[in-house]
């Protein structure tokens, strides 16, 4: 029996995880072809920060070496960016003219970094932080230059700042919000984090907007100017001000996009049922996820439907956050900011650098924010994700799993959609 043809555009973590799940349940159903714009096999993008910090090597973060593709008879086109798809004839076309036909198409084009539209953004030394090439550029710059500015005080920006600091650069983080990681931490936890990073030598400019990047007359950046009139020297500027779903190809071929490539609960695009999408480029129920766990959950559902045995549906994900900076532990999940209809349990030890806040509503944990002591993060996340009742352990909840009795499991229902 002739195999169907599956083509995947994008060779990142979400897409390859989908293939791994597919090969487990239907290893002989498809001839698989993968196009990757980068010249590398699938690697662990979230471990680029330890590579920048000198704690790991690029070889150590490769997830699927070339031998894996060969073992599974996957045709791999590395360094080939797909520029068009003929949906009527079902042909994928790369920039160099390479073509592949498909019966099913999986689009996993990920996201693009947001580059601030300011004068000087095209100068040498101004980069984003998304891939191995960016990481290598920063490592090289650290051997030649002294001053770096990171624009963006989110997870990626702080990881970049820490890595460049460890490589000997003087680093300033510029952030438009009043505190760091404003989407992941409350003000108290963010204050402890900033204090720790300042002790390591990283400088911060909060509530600050960049107005221009100044060149040195030879095409390279030399300084960053701010709207308040200030300026700091910078021979390297790292833009870490957010990401946008990479939907350019999808839009070009007529797929419906709105905050990402719009997909249904089986990860099929709403425009063309032969085309699926997972990862940072996909928008499910109005949300494009940028964390790995939800993307892997999407991949598992997608694989079952590609295997033609699918009964599962992707219904969205609860997410949690951790920072990959050695010696700094933080965790947050759910509605950690709380609200008028919520209760808060808070424990502070500023001297010991420990802070915990649990947010409770209707006898359930709905949010958690922790700094310094995150050993119980996974347990809190389980309580939150599974909506377990905590009324019997409320008084001990802040002290963690070892102090609290097991929470009451929710009543079983007849819903089999998960």
Image (cartoon, rainbow, N blue to C red):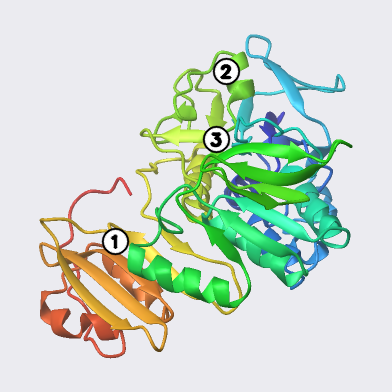
| Along the viewing direction, whichever of 211 and 6 lies nearer the viewer | 211
Q: Residue at coordinates 82% horizontally, 31% vertically from top-left?
A: 80
Q: Is residue 249 above or below residue 399?
A: above
Badge 2 element: helix
| Along the viewing direction, whichever of 187 and 40 lies nearer the viewer | 187
Q: Position of residue 187 (x, y in %)?
A: 34, 63
Residue wearing tag 1:
336
Q: Residue at coordinates 30% horizontally, 61% vertically from top-left?
A: 385
Mark 2 to mark 1 CA distance (whole Å): 36 Å
Badge 3 element: strand
Q: Pointer 2: residues within 10 angstroms few (<14), some, or many (20+)?
A: some
Q: Is residue 265 left or right of residue 104?
A: left
Q: Position of residue 67 (x, y in %)?
A: 84, 55
Indicate which disc residue 36 carries: none
Residue wearing tag 2:
251
Q: Give residue 65's quadrant in the image.
A: bottom right
Q: Position of residue 325 (x, y in %)?
A: 59, 70
Q: Pointer 1: residues within 10 angstroms few (<14), some, or many (20+)?
A: many
Q: Give residue 139's quadrant in the image.
A: bottom right
Q: Nearer the viewer, mark 2 or mark 1?
A: 1
Whether residue 20 can be seen here: no
Q: Is residue 398 above or below residue 360?
A: below
Q: Earlier in the sequence, mark 1 or mark 3?
A: 3
Residue wearing tag 3:
244
């Amino acid at each position: 029996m002739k195999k169907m043809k599956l083509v995947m555009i994008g060779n990142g973590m979400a897409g390859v995880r989908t293939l791994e799940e597919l090969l487990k349940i239907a290893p002989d159903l498809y001839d698989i072809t993968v196009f990757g714009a980068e010249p590398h096999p699938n690697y662990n993008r979230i471990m680029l920060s330890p590579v920048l910090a000198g704690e790991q090597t690029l070889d150590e973060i490769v997830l699927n070496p070339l031998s894996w593709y060969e073992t599974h008879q996957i045709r791999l086109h590395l360094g080939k960016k797909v520029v068009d798809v003929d949906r009527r004839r079902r042909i994928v076309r790369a920039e160099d003219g390479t073509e592949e036909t498909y019966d099913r198409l999986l689009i996993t084009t990920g996201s693009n970094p947001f580059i601030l539209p300011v004068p000087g953004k095209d100068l040498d030394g101004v980069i984003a932080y998304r891939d191995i090439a960016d990481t290598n550029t920063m490592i090289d710059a650290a051997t030649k230059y002294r001053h770096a500015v990171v624009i963006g005080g989110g997870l990626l920006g702080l990881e970049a700042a820490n890595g460049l600091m460890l490589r000997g650069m003087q680093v300033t983080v510029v952030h438009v919000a009043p505190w760091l990681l404003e989407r992941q931490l409350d003000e108290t936890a963010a204050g402890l984090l900033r204090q720790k990073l300042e002790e390591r030598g990283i400088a911060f400019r909060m509530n600050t907007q960049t107005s221009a990047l100044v060149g040195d007359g030879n095409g390279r950046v030399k300084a960053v100017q701010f709207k308040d009139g200030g300026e700091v020297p910078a021979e390297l500027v790292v833009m870490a001000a957010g990401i946008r779903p990479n939907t350019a190809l999808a839009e070009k071929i007529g797929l419906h996009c709105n905050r990402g490539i719009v997909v249904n609960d089986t990860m099929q695009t709403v425009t063309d049922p032969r085309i699926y999408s997972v990862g940072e480029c996909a928008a499910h129920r109005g949300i494009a996820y940028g964390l790995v766990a939800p993307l892997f959950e999407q991949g598992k559902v997608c694989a079952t439907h590609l295997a033609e045995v699918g009964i599962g549906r992707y219904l969205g994900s609860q997410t949690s956050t951790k920072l990959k900076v050695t010696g700094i532990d933080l965790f947050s999940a759910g509605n950690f900011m709380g609200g008028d209809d919520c209760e808060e349990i808070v424990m502070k030890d500023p001297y010991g650098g420990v802070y915990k806040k649990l947010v409770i509503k209707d006898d359930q944990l709905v949010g958690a924010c922790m700094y310094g002591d995150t050993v119980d993060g996974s347990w809190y996340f389980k309580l939150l994700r599974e909506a377990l009742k905590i009324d019997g352990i409320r008084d001990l909840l802040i002290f963690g799993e070892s102090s609290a009795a097991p929470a009451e499991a929710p009543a079983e229902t007849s819903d089999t959609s998960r």
